[in-house]
Amino acid sequence: MNSALWIKTIRECRVFLAGGMVFMFAVHWLRVWIASFFSVGALEGIFALMPGEVETLLPVTYSQMATPAGRIAIAYDDPIVLLLMTVWAISRGSDAVSGELNRGTLEMVLAQPVTRLGVLFSQAAVTLAGGVLLAAAALLGTLVGLSTVTLDDPVSIGVFVPAALNLLSITVFLAGLTTMVSAATSLRSRTIGLVGGFYAVSMVVKIVSRMAPGWEWLAYCSFFTPFEPQLLVGDQARAWAFWVETSSGATELGGLGYDSTLVGLGLMGYVAAGVIFSHRDLPAPL
């Protein structure tokens, strides 16, 4: 039955995963191709015409964004790319418990010789493996782009590894959070609504923390704060450090600190989901 459980879980998401991998590969390959159309000087001239207030919303300076690596790194922070990873995490996490309850299939699954934790583990493992494959597809697209497109300055694929890891880390966090909420609710729509609302509020909080003077402390209240793939590409010293010291003497998280925070919170969500699911009473199917 364990093998049947794994096959069932993979079968439910294989089309979405395959399509998502193709999309991630294509977007990141195209980003390298598009980046080859612009020179550093041309972009710096364009950025010079933009108001300085816009730069406060960006994770890197205009000059860093104008470099070949900076232009390509935008793909890892692209709203469409982030949306795909978010949809993957929330759709799979919400289906783990509340989705099965909605369809009335969870009782049939648990009637077989499997444990609740076994069911949850198969869902979590497939979700996390899918996140790894999606992030790997993004990195592969960048690699193929760098191999087939000529840029004004050569760029190593290694500088984008921290960005791909950061993209994977936020996926792990969202998957763990959604699975925890799914384990505590009985309606998939409620799970998606709660996590979606939290997602939107967190995004607004980060924007306010960057734009509003005196409200910088709000950055500590958003899970988007440790998601900075462009920053990690532009600052390799930060990318591979847990902690970095700023020019003002303050200590901030580095790339490994960002990833550890997101992955750690995501795994805590999975642990909480296991505890909740193991002890909750399941409602009768409607």
Image: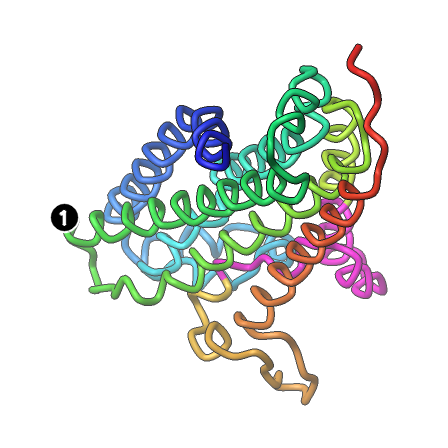
Callout 1 crowding tier (Cα within 10 Å): few <14, some 14–19, many ≥20: few
Residue in view at x 69 percent, y 40 percent: 178
* Residue 210 is covered by the magenta coloring: yes
Residue in view at x 53 percent, y 72 percent: 256
Q: Secondary structure at mark 1?
A: helix
Residue in view at x 56 percent, y 47 percent: 171
Residue 222 quadrant: bottom right
Using residue 14 as the reference point, say whether residue 140 is left or right of it: left
The image position of residue 163, as x and y in percent, is: 44, 59
Q: Which stretch is magenta?
A: 202-230
Residue 233 quadrant: bottom left
Using residue 89 as the reference point, say whether residue 178 is left or right of it: right
Residue in view at x 78 percent, y 23 percent: 187
The image position of residue 104, as x and y in percent, is: 70, 15
204 vs 235: above or below: above
Q: Which residue is mark 1?
A: 148
The C terminus is located in which quarter?
top right
Depth check: 55 or 225 in front? 225
* Residue 227 is covered by the magenta coloring: yes
